Image (cartoon, helix red, strand yellow):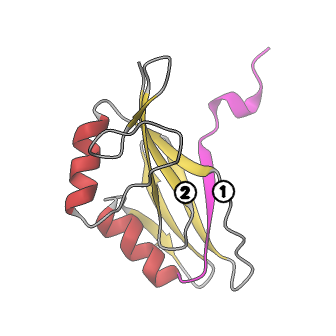
Amino acid sequence: MEGMLASARTVAFVPSTDLGRSRAFYESVLGLPVVSADGFAVVVDGPGGLIRITDVGSALRVQSFTVLGWEVEDVAAEVDELLAGGVEFLRYPGLDHDDRGVWTAPGGARVAWFHDPDGNTLSLSQPA
């Protein structure tokens, strides 16, 4: 039996301490269109659903893991585009990254990680 949520659009939540700075990053650097903005959140649209960037004041606790990611067809091209926009990619000890900062998983998927302005870890992944 398929539940009602199987056809509902997903909304992801990302914390922010500065909505103006976050809006500039998600809209101008990542290229996601803003669909609404107020004093509580900026909502951007993407092919997989909405992302609600929520003002958490000083209560932000940055996580050490990826909080949001995109599956892309060509991770190298996406990384190059973001590098041109000033995004810095992360390198993790013990993982063999290529010159762009892309890691190839044992199964063949390729992954690159970066931070948003609040230090939230975001990722790009290309399936094997």
122 up-or-down from 8: above or below: below
Q: Is residue 8 magenta?
A: yes
Q: Amino acid at mark 1?
A: Ser
Closer-to-camera residue (89/32): 89
Over which residues does the magenta segment extend?
1-18
Task: Return the x and y of residue 112 as percentages of the image width and height.
Answer: 41, 44
Q: Disc 2 to disc 1, how far (Cα)?
A: 7 Å
Closer-to-camera residue (57/46): 57
Closer-to-camera residue (55/89): 89
Task: Return the x and y of residue 11 as percentages of the image width and height.
Answer: 61, 51
Residue identifier under label 2:
121
Q: The residue tagged with tag 1: helix, strand or loop?
A: loop
35 up-or-down from 57: above or below: above
Crowd class of label 2 (few under 14; some 14 to 19; many from 20; radius 10 Å): some
Instruction: Identify the image quadrant of residue 23.
Output: bottom left
First in sequence, mark 2 or 1: give its number. Answer: 1
Residue identifier under label 1:
64
Cβ–Cβ under 8 Å for marks 2 and 1: yes
Q: Amino acid at mark 2?
A: Thr
Q: Is residue 64 magenta?
A: no
